[in-house]
Image (cartoon, grey):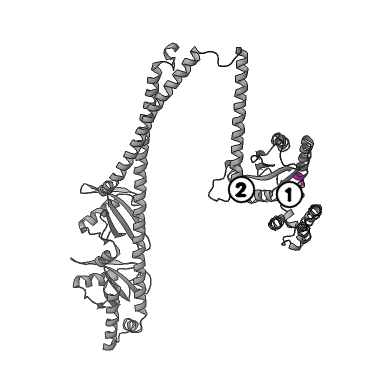
Amino acid sequence: MKKHFKLDITNKQYRSVLLLSYSTIAIIAIAIVLTGLFSWFNVYTQRVIYNLSMTQLQNLDTTISNNLDMWRTQLQTAWQDANIKQHIYTQSDSWKTENWIGSYLQRLCVNNGFAEYVCLFRSEDEFRYYGWRYPEEAEIQQIEQRIMETQNDTQQFIIETSNRKNLCIFLTDRKAMGVSPQRGIIYSLDLDQMEKKLISQKIEDSILLVYTSDGQSIINGKLSDERVEQIWNLLQNQDMSSPGMEIVLDESKYLCNSLYNDVTDMHFVMLQDYHIIQTRMTGTKKAAFISVVASLFIALLLAVILANKLYYPLQDFFSKIGSGPEILPGNEEYSRQQAEITSERIISQIHMMSQQYHSDKILWFLGGEDTDTDIPPVLRLQDRGEHCLFLLYWTNRHYLDENFSSDIYSILERNHSGCKISAFADTGSPWLLILLKEPVRSGSLSDWNKLQPLLEDECTQMAKIHGTQIFYAVSALISEEKDLRPNFQELQMLLKYHLLGQSRKGMTSEIFEDRKKLDIPKKIYDDFLDRIKKGKTEEAIAQLPLLLDELSSYNIKKVLLSLSELCVQ
């Protein structure tokens, strides 16, 4: 049976198989991408609609809560007025006091913008009304009955007549919580005016409703009372806290989101017409569909072209192999050896290139300042529970031997078996950076008294192997990733001491604290510059070692700055 499945790529059938495979993969890819795209699009759209709805509901909640607080503050201010307090707490009245109270409360209603009248009462049988509109008899009966049924001043109640609906908030004086009030002041607010001023009327696809906890409508959203009651009944039968629930009204589907404020005891509800939303999103879906289909059609076309371009070169290549002479001269053994040597060289070159790319990437990160750059995985610490040390090696020559990296790696691997070891070197650089990492719980890198002699012994071994003097600098123990770059920069600064002939084994950043941080006096160079100006070059050169010794007591940053100024002179 195997011979029936044997595929000869120089056969014409290969081209058909290749075309069929590319076409099948392209069709499957189209199906998967389209399914995933529109599934994601629907989920994303629902999430965006829900977030926008909740934002509007929270804004409405904040607006109404702030207005309620402001109106209660106005009542508190009015309650503290001397004339109103005298009227409420005493039985004595005068035309002057009565006239002042009427003018004050009328101005309060007009300036408020929502209030129609204010009611003052000093017993359950004595109520007086002030404002720009006098209430109807049905309103008066509801107010005087409902206020006596309240338990505390955080409540509010709604009064309704055939053509009006008002929200009443109040401030009262009671003998105890939970009993009827003895006296007080009541604000009557026009809910129609509140809806017109607090809710935008230009939103076509959304309806905003506000209910009390017992289902009374505060804001109708321009719907009839029957429809508002129907919506409340539907919401009562569902979980009002669930996002994006759907309700159906007269065969029209709406997305419903709600928010409850336990302080004001109000439910804020938003209905969004699903049909309008779908209509608006149709254009976006169509554009996305066209772009995806066009992209995948181009991919299919390129697949067909690739199948043709791949088939004919392969056919020509194998025809030459079958008809031409041997590619390599000599016998078969010689050809095999040459092929093995070539393969080893290619693999070696690829390994060196990949290793150098890895080093360049790490060193570019450590030497950069871009805070948005992702930290390379080999340098990560916190999420892996590790800490690390940087070791920087260099010699008294201006280059490193080819085997230096592998030799020091072998020594470190033998002496620090519990650590992860990584080596990085820039192309042509005279130094090598070593990263030693270990789990924080191990603690071998944090014990400097044990680590220092071990590093010095390793440096001595390397000096014997390569026959040259070797120096190294070691960073502080690094536990946080934000300290990687500063410690690497300190090591590079320590390397600059080599320019002044001051390198030594085991250099640390503490050397910066031992050197003077003062600016170097320019008079140090006066004698040196004077010899150069007079043409006494040999004497100036002979003076250089003394000059460098004098500079050795200063911080390297100050030395480099001073030498650059000397070069300019």
Pinpoint residue 529: horizontal percent, then vertical percent.
76, 59
Pinpoint residue 95: horizontal percent, then vertical percent.
26, 88
Badge 1 marks a residue whose secondary structure is helix
Quarter placement of the N terminus: top left
In this picture, is 336 found above or below 553?
Answer: above
Compare residues 26 and 84 and report the one nearer the observer.
Answer: 26
Residue type, label 1: Leu
Asked if the stretch drawn in magenta spans residue 449, the answer is yes
Q: How many numbered dots are placed on residues in this image?
A: 2
- At a point 31% along the width and 75% down the height, the residue shown is 185
Quarter placement of the C terminus: bottom right
**Camera sees residue 148:** no
> Which residue bears the numbered disc 1?
499
Pinpoint residue 314: horizontal percent, then vertical percent.
45, 20
Q: Most prominent secondary structure in the magenta stretch?
A: helix
User: In which quadrant of the rendered view does residue 429 lie?
Assistant: top right
Pinpoint residue 117: horizontal percent, then vertical percent.
26, 75
> Which residue bears the numbered disc 2?
367
- At a point 72% along the width and 34% down the height, the residue shown is 407
Disc 2 residue crowd, few under 14, some 14–19, many 20+, Cα 10 Å: some
Disc 1 residue crowd, few under 14, some 14–19, many 20+, Cα 10 Å: few
Q: Do the CB atoms of the residues marked 2 and 1 lie less than 8 Å apart?
A: no
**Camera sees residue 52:** yes
In this picture, is 468 found above or below 6?
Answer: below
Q: CA distance from mark 2 to mark 1?
A: 20 Å
Badge 2 marks a residue whose secondary structure is helix
| Residue range (magenta) | 448-452
Compare residues 271 and 428 and report the one nearer the observer.
Answer: 428
| Residue located farthest toward the front when viewing the structure as drawn | 535
Residue type, label 2: Gly
Q: Nearer the viewer, mark 2 or mark 1?
A: 1
